[in-house]
Image (cartoon, rainbow, N blue to C red):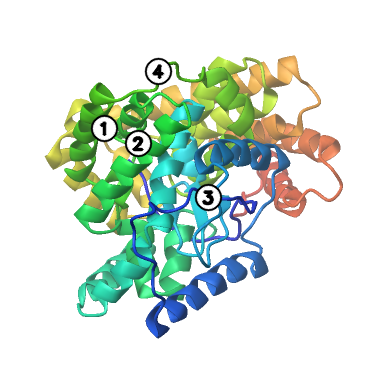
Amino acid sequence: MRQIYFASTLLAFSVVLPARAQAPSAPPFQFTAIDEKLLADTNELDQQLEKKGLVYHDPQVETYLARVAQQLLGEAPPPEKVAFKFRVARDPMVNAFALPNGSIYVNSGLLAVMTDEAELASILAHEITHVTNRHTYLQNRNLRKKVVTLNVISLVGAAGGYFPYGSVFGIALRSAAAASEVLLVATIFGYSQEMEREADSAGFNRMVQANYDGEAMVHAFEHLDEKLEFEPVEPFWRTHPKLQDRIAMAKAMARVERAGKPREVNETEYLAAVAPVIRYNSIADLDSRRARTAIARMQRLINWEPGNATDQTLLADGYRSLSAKPPHPDTEELSDRGQSLDRKRMLKLTADEEQQQLLRTPQGKAALENNRAKAESLYRETISQTPEFPDAHRGLGMLYQEQARYPEAAREYREYLRLAPADAPDRLRIERRLASASGAASGGTETK
């Protein structure tokens, strides 16, 4: 499983596109002062993401996402006060959300679990419906009469303490919470059941009209039922039993109506378009104590493109970061009791404390040995294939230092510093590691 918090990057792009018009029979939406205030808050949220450096523009992803979105939007003009912008949030949380001004965000974590263009289209079509049907405005009017947001905000605050400094997990949730209570609720926990059913149904029709196979919506929802990691807060897209209900509904719609001859899509084309985002997401997962997820994502890229030095090094980093945790949850860990224990451990213990607890068991000691052996093998294989790739030397040096193999660690750090750019952001950190390993190798005490 997966989920939440803050750092300093959000992979995003903006393209203004036309949208399908609302149904002719729908009465015009009448903006009130309350709606105008929400729109202003939404525009401010977008601006703050830009100002704070939380938006990263990737031409390859921009082009791909724009093409998929255009297929869904058609040629009709957008609703009043809507300018569609499709953005990819650098956030490992598996989530997507729409803002009432037309900004639609797909988290990198969600892109990493989709397998083809049609599945992505089903997510975008769902979110487009939230915008065209004015769901955020309508929910805002309704929530003003309730106090439910207080519980949500408390939950978000409690979960925030789980993630270490520098983690981008849940950045969208943190940003939405700072902007508006209703945006927080809408972006993470979804809308009313009626609105969500409407978004699924209308989104399904939109994707079929765009010549995508409706069965892809079923597959997209099924991919979201992955159970690899602990999540302190689950967004709407991952919540049970809602997810199971949505899968059943999507299957029923697919049985009734599917595109006559849907456009051909495949995983190879999808990965070729979004691989940079998946690589970023794996780094973000590693920074958020989510090594299992990072390993799964990088193994997928390696299966698609064997021999890629960056992917192999990130996979090795994942095994090294796992330490005493097995790469896959066992049956006990997947049970309700196991998930409850995992939740308590992750919320109460730091990463180091968790590893020490695991190392008290024979299973933890065996996992540590196996993970380190796998990491070393991958680092060495990468160096053998691409000797001038600096990141593999850095990772191998860290692994050796963790094993108290100080002369070998110092050698790999020196090689990294020789090969890395002069302005590498971690150069000073590796120089300090080199000094520490060198001191320990010469008989001194390793400095931390």
Indicate left or right for 167 with 248 as reference. right
Q: Where is residue 333 in the image (x, y as percent from the top left)?
A: 21, 34
Give the residue pinned by disc 1: 250
Residue matched to label 4: 260
| Most distant residue in the bottom direction | 33
Q: Are marks 1 and 2 in contact (CB under 8 Å)?
A: yes
The residue lying furthest to the left in this view is: 337
Query: Which element carries disc 1, helix, strand or loop?
Result: helix
Look at label 2 and name its amino acid.
Phe
> Disc 4 marks which amino acid?
Gly
Label 2 or label 3, whichever lies nearer to me, is 3
Q: Around disc 3, counting alpha carbons within 10 Å, would you say few (fewer than 14), some (14 to 19), or many (20 or more)?
A: many
First in residue order: circle 3 vs circle 4: 3
Q: Which mark is residue 204?
A: 2
Q: How far apart are marks 3 and 4 (CA)?
A: 23 Å
Q: In which quarter of the image is the C terminus?
A: bottom right
Distance between mark 4 and mark 1 Cα atoms: 17 Å
**Image: 415 above or below 154:** above
- Of mark 4 and mark 1, the one earlier in the sequence is 1
Label 3 vs label 1, nearer the camera: 3
Q: Which residue is drawn at 47% across and 52% down?
A: 21
Q: Nearer the viewer, mark 1 or mark 2?
A: 2
Residue drawn 24% across and 22% down? 255
- Where is residue 343 drawn, in percent x and y? 24, 50
Between 295 and 373, the residue placed more toward the observer is: 295
Could you say which is closer to the camera, residue 231 or residue 370?
Answer: 231
Tell me the residue that label 3 is attached to. Answer: 19
Work out how far the residue at label 2 is from the one at label 3, CA to CA, in angstroms. 16 Å
Residue 277 badge: none
- The span from disc 2 to disc 4 (Cα, nearest Å) is 14 Å
